[in-house]
């Protein structure tokens, strides 16, 4: 992730809008700022805790079903 932070990336939500009627509540800028402020507010509760990183593949769970349907 750190190696690509300076690169543009785009994700389309057209299929979610079309098939599910999805309407985003926040713009990309608003979502990033909300998440960043949440991170700052909760940072101390996660310090010194071990966990998994973003480099670990997600369990597919319900996502696997959605991939099959769409």
Image (tube, rainbow, N blue to C red):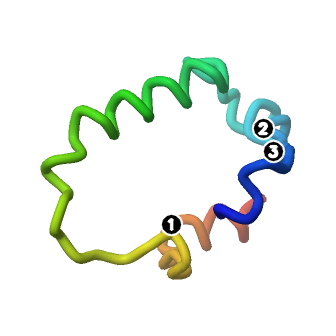
For marks 2 and 1, give the CA distance: 18 Å
Which residue does the image show at 20% across and 57% down from the upper left?
46
Camera-nearest label, 2 or 3 = 3
State the image coordinates of residue 32 (x, y, percent, origin top left). 55, 30
Q: How many marks?
A: 3
Residue 62: which numbered mark, if any?
A: 1
Residue 11: which numbered mark, if any?
A: 3
* Front residue (pair 14, 68): 14
Label 1 near label 2: C-beta < 8 Å?
A: no
Which residue does the image show at 72% across and 52% down from the upper left?
5
14 to the left or right of 47: right
For marks 1 and 3, give the CA distance: 20 Å
Whether residue 41 can be seen here: yes
State the image coordinates of residue 18 (x, y, percent, origin top left). 82, 33
Label 3 near label 2: C-beta < 8 Å?
A: yes
For marks 2 and 3, give the CA distance: 7 Å
15 to the left or right of 42: right
Residue 13: which numbered mark, if any?
A: 2
Q: Above or below — where is 66 with respect to 68?
A: above
State the image coordinates of residue 15 (x, y, percent, origin top left). 82, 41
């Amino acid at each position: 992730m750190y190696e690509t932070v300076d690169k543009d990336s785009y994700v389309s939500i057209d299929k979610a809008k079309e098939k599910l009627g999805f309407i985003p509540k926040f713009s990309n800028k608003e979502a990033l700022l909300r998440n960043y402020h949440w991170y700052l507010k909760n940072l101390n509760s996660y310090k010194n805790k071990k966990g998994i990183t973003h480099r670990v593949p997600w369990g597919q769970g319900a996502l696997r079903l959605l991939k099959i349907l769409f």
